[in-house]
Image: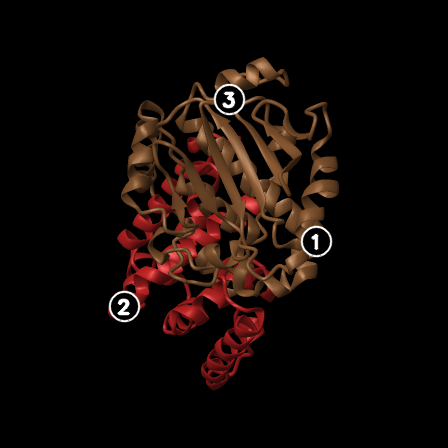
Chain colours: A red, B brown
Amino acid sequence: MKSAEEVVKTYENLLYRAALHITGNRDDALDMVQETLIKWITSRPDFASDEHEKAWLLRVVMNLSRNLVGSMAKKSAVELLDIYPAETKEEEGVMQEVLDLPENLRAVIYLYYYEGYNTTEIAEILQENASTVRTWLSRGRERLRKVLKEEGESIHERL
Amino acid sequence: MSAYKDYIDRISLDEEQHEKLLQAIREAETEKNADPSSRRKRLLRSPLKTMGLIASAAAVAIVLFALPSLSDKTSDASLTFAAAIPNEDMVIDQAATEYAVNTAGQYAAASRAEEAGPVEAPLGSGQAEEEEVKSEVLTYQFTADLFGKIGHADAETAADGRKSETPAYVTAAPTALPDSADLDRVIAEILNEAFLEMSETKESAAFDYRFTYQNEVVCRYDSASGFLSADGKGATLSDARREQLNMLLKAYFESK
């Protein structure tokens, strides 16, 4: 069983990125990470593998973040790009588009393209039906494709 | 490298955020270690709605799994799970339920009954020892909507923070439950977690839980040894689960 500090060190950035991706706000994201880790401490789940542990933590942080965002007025993605400026125009463009997506599409895009989960795994993490997740992924791609196409690049090149 | 991944790769906590987080986590852990009852208090503040848990000084009954639709032939097949517990001040931690939801959601932990060492002093199988601790009886009655109950867990208290009334595992109705091996695992884990949680709040407690089927003990759970056969003579966990627990569940599903 990992110590709390080990878990913090191992997963803090993973959780922070995921939370930030959904909340778009650094303080909110940090709160979500903290809350997630406290849930881990209080329930101390005994996972079969590190992958299970990672998935559980992602699930918690994603759900908490989505709940938070759902209870707030939509935030602009500008804040995130102010805090963590893009290094290239390309980065800025694609991040702006991703962060402008609704939180559900953003979550799916993040888990699929950044974390590398398939739609079945994403469904488990987000506690949604796999078909719903596939629909969201398709919509997210479509939204991004439309924008990116205007800029003359394919979605796969950009993501 | 994609622009998207490049950007996200650069996001990380700064030193100040890292320290702040570590401090908060250390405090949370210290608080939990120093005062196990704080967790209990926290959980008690949150009504045990999830599984309809009822705790009382005299006895505790948990309706987990209703069997309302059993045929006449099996109508007395209520699967009860009796436990001898030494203390009146019995609290069942909701985290056990929460964890059950999580494990059922396919983030399965290895069975603690197989991996964990004794959590409390062994009860042993002798009658005299059993009598000593049998000051109360905790009965788990498995009834038909274990999964429905979990599925309607209070949104505010779900372990993973999701405000949903349909955790992944329970989106299916009982008629579409996973295969028996999976169900078997889930139930064993639910029970193990529940017991470990209970033992956590009652340090002196030793448990000897019994599954009864038509008034006969068919398998037992000893806090030190895990699952045992009815006579307490060392059946393995898998024996107990597959041959006995499944038999009862099968009766239920066949009756549907």
Q: Is residue B99 left or right of residue A66?
A: right
Residue A48 at x, y percent in the picture: 61, 40
Residue B30 at x, y percent in the picture: 32, 26
Disc nearest the viewer among 1 and 2: 1
Q: Mark 3 is on which residue type?
A: Ala
Q: Residue at x 64, y 51 (%)?
A: B183
- The answer to whether A15 is drawn above or below residue A128 in the figure is above
Task: From the viewer's side, name the closer residue of A22 and B133.
Answer: B133
Disc 1 element: helix
Same chain? Circles 1 and 3 = yes
- The answer to whether B174 is drawn above or below residue B146 in the figure is below
Residue B31 at x, y percent in the picture: 30, 28
Q: Mark 1 is on which residue type?
A: Lys
- The answer to whether A137 is drawn above or below residue B185 in the figure is below
Disc nearest the viewer among 2 and 3: 3
Task: Measure how far apart labels 1 and 2 are at the Cα level.
Answer: 51 Å
- Reading the image, the residue beneath label 3 is B206
Same chain? Circles 2 and 3 = no
> Residue B27 is drawn in which quadrant?
top left
